Image (cartoon, helix red, strand yellow):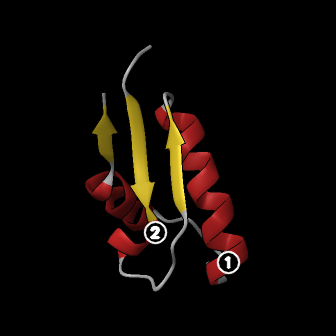
Amino acid sequence: MGSVKVVRCSDAGFDCNAVFRSESEEELMAQVAAHAKEAHNLTEITDEVVQKVKSIMKVEA
């Protein structure tokens, strides 16, 4: 099994326990974007948001 990328919503500064995992960065970003729009009313996923998410992304072996 490859490494799994993880994003925790709380690491982005939200009071939210959501955690996303995927071996694919593209799939992980899609999950996070959908959650951000639905749960946090983020209407647009800007380059700044993408960079923030990438900066808090961790890798689990």
Mark 2: few, some, or many residues within 10 Å (few <14, many ≥20)?
some
Local SS, label 1: helix
- Where does the C terminus fall, quadrant-wise? top left
The disc placed on residue 51 is none
Q: Label 2, on which residue?
A: 9
Tell me if residue 18 comes above or below residue 6 in the rendering.
Answer: below
Tell me if residue 41 comes above or below residue 12 in the rendering.
Answer: below
Marks 1 and 2 in Cβ contact (< 8 Å): yes
Residue 5 appears left or right of 34? left
Marks 1 and 2, the one that precedes in the sequence: 2
Amino acid type indicated by mark 1: Ala
Say which residue appears at 65% left-offset and 65% top-offset: 35
- Where does the N terminus fall, quadrant-wise? top left
Measured as percent of width and height from the top left, residue 7 is found at 42, 54
Q: Label 1, on which residue?
A: 39
Residue 13, quarter of picture: bottom left
Say which residue appears at 40% left-offset and 17% top-offset: 2
